[in-house]
Amino acid sequence: MSVSILWAFILSSVTTLQSPIALPTDVLKQEQERVALVKKISPPTVAVVSGGGSGVLISEEGYALTNFHVVGTGSPALKCGLPDGKLYDGVIVGLDKMGDLALIKLIGPKPEFKFPFATMGDSDEVQTGDWAVAAGNPFLLASDFTPTVTFGLVSGTHRYQYPERGMFEYTDCIQMDASINPGNSGGPLFNMKGQLIGINGRGSFDKRGRVNSGVGYAISINQCKKFMGSLKAGLRVEHAGLGALVGTVDDSAISRVLVNQVIPSDAMRRGIQPEDQIISFAGRPIATVNQFKNILGTIPAGWKVPIGIRRITETGETKRIDLLVRLTSGERPEPPVKPEQSQDRPGQPKPAPKPLPDIVKAIYESKNGYANFHFNKVSRDSALLRLQNQLKLLDQKGDWIIKGTGTLQEKNNSSNWQLSISTAREAVEGKPAKPDLVAVSLDGIDFSLEPLKADLEPKALRDPPGSGGLLVALFQMRQLLALGTAGFPGEGISHGGMEPYWAPGNSAEPITQRKSIMAEVLKSSLGGIQGRWYLDPESGYLLAVEFTIDPNEDTCEIHFANPVTDSAGRRLPRDWVVIHGDKTFARLKVSDWKLSP
C-alpha cells in the first residue's frame, strides 16, 4: 500500500470518528428512562450519618426504614442527610432485631413540612431476572448526601440466610447482583418502576477486605409491611414460632415436612400432633423445612395463620385438616444484663451519655420492652379516640343492663339472656358498700361474679362453664369502654400494632376459604388477665375482644357485628358470638342496651 493511500485511509477514519454516531432509538430511550428513574428514587434515599448506613423515606411525615444493625445499638437520637444537601434530626421509632429492620422518623423544620417518599411495591411479584436498582451511601462517599446508585439483576427470590449470633435472620429475601457495600445497609432496592421492593442489608462479602462479591440480600418489602404496624407503635417486635419442631423427610419422590415434637402452645391446643405433615402454611404450599422457615420468619409473633396438615389415622386413612393457629414467639428471651465490673480507675467514673437534643427529647420515651414508648402512646390514644367516637360509652359509669335473645352451645332453641354490670359504691347514709358485680342469665341459668375480689376461685374466673371466662371478659370490656385508660391502672393499655383478624365462620366453611382483614390491636392488662382488642383500622369500630386467664388455656373471644345506631348516636353491636377454643359457646342478639346515670 502506498503512503498516499495509507494517509487517505487514516484521514477518512478520523473524519468518520468525528461524525456523530447515530444510536438506535430504543437504546436512547432506555438511557433516558434510567436517568429519569434515578431522579425519581434519589430524593427519598436517606444517608443515616449517625449509623454510617442508609435508609429510605416511606411517608411524607418522615418515617423511614433502615437496618437494625445501622441504628439499633446506639443513641435513639439520629442525624440523617437527604439529597437536598440538608442534615435532619431523627429518632428511633420501632426495632426488629431478628429481622434486622428498624423504623426511624426524620424531623422536619416545621410541623407542616412534607418529606419526599418512596412508593412501596409488591415484592411477591419480583422474579429472578428482573432488573433492580440499589441506592445508598457506600463507604460514606457522598458528603452532599446524594446517593450512589447501582444497577443489576435479581439473582434469586425466596432466599434464606441463617441468623448471625442469634439475630439478623433474612427469610424469604431477595438476592441481587446490584453492588452493595458497607454503608449501603438499610438503603432501598427499587424495581424499574421506581417502586420500593426491599431494604438492602446483608451481602456475601470477602471476609478480609469486605469487598462486594456480587451477591447481596434485601429484606422483602412485603415482610416489612407485616411488621410496619408494630414498628410504628414503637415496639421491639418479635418473630413468630409455631410451637412445634419440624423436619424434612425424603422417603419418596416428593419431600415432606413432618412435625417431630409439639410443645405447650396454641398449636398443641388446636390438635397438631407428631407425625402430622404440614402441607400449607399461611396460604403457601410447604414441601421443605427451608420453605417453612422462610415463611415463618416473615410473620410477627402472636398472629393467627391458617395451617393445612395431612394426617394418617389409626385405620390407615389419610385426611386433611385445616387449622387456625396463633403463633408463639420464635425468639429466645435475652438473658438479664449483669452489671459490668468497672474497669475505670478510682475517681474516674464512666462518661455520662450525651443528652438528647430537645427536638428529639420531645418525641422519645424510654420504657422496657419498647423501642420508643412515646409512639406507642400516640398510636394507643389515637385508636382509643376513634373507638370512643363510634361507641360513645366513655364516662357512662353507671350500671349497664343488656338484654336480648340467643342460642347456647350450638343448641337450636333460642332463649332470652340478660347481662347486668353494676358499679361499686362506698357506704353512704346507712347504705352498705357494694362491690363491682357482673351477672349473666343464659338459658335460664344465672351466673354472677365480683371480678375484683381478692380471693376468687379459679373456677369462678372461667364462668359460665365452657365460655373461658365470659363474666371476666364482659367486666373488662366495660372498664375500657366506660372508663378508658383509667379503668386499667398504670400502663394497663398499650398499642399492639396490626395483625390479621379472622371473623368467625360457620362450621362447614373451611379455614382456607375464609378471609382475614388487617386490624388495629390494643392490649390490656388488669388483675393478671391479658386482653386483646381488635379495631377496624379505618373507622375504629370494635370488631372483637379476647381475654386470657391462663396463657396455657384457650381465650374467651367475643366477636361483634351489625352495629345499630341508637338515639344517642352510639353505634352499638347487635350480634355477639362468644367462642372458646374451637367451640362456639353462644350466639347472642342484643335487643336493648340501657345505661344508668
Image (cartoon, rainbow, N blue to C red):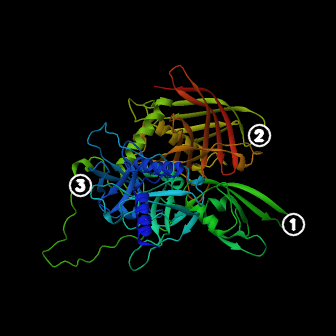
Q: Amino acid at mark 1?
A: Thr
For label 2, the crowd category at 10 Å Cα-Cα, with few meaning under 14, some 14 to 19 and many 20 or more, is few
Q: How far is the residue under mark 2 from the one under mark 1?
A: 32 Å
Q: How far is the residue under mark 3 from the one under mark 2?
A: 62 Å
Image quadrant where residue 282 sits? bottom right
Give the labeled residue for mark 1: 315
Q: Secondary structure at mark 2?
A: loop
List x then y, in percent, for residue 150: 43, 60
Give the labeled residue for mark 3: 356
Q: Secondary structure at mark 1?
A: loop
Q: Secondary structure at mark 3?
A: loop
| Left or right of residue 266: residue 496 | left
Give the labeled residue for mark 2: 411
First in residue order: circle 3 vs circle 2: 3
* Residue at (51% x, 36% y) in the render: 538
Closer to the eye: label 3 or 2: 3
For label 1, the crowd category at 10 Å Cα-Cα, with few meaning under 14, some 14 to 19 and many 20 or more, is few
Q: Quadrant of the C terminus?
A: top left
Closer to the eye: label 1 or 3: 3
The answer to whether residue 529 is visible is no
* Residue at (52% x, 51% y) in the render: 24
Q: Nearer the viewer, residue 175 or 422?
A: 175
| Left or right of residue 487: residue 414 | right
First in residue order: circle 2 vs circle 1: 1
Q: Nearer the viewer, residue 353 or 406?
A: 353
List x then y, in percent, for residue 167: 46, 68
First in residue order: circle 1 vs circle 3: 1
* Residue at (73% x, 55% y) in the render: 322
For label 3, the crowd category at 10 Å Cα-Cα, with few meaning under 14, some 14 to 19 and many 20 or more, is some
List x then y, in percent, for residue 71: 35, 61
List x then y, in percent, for residue 495: 45, 47
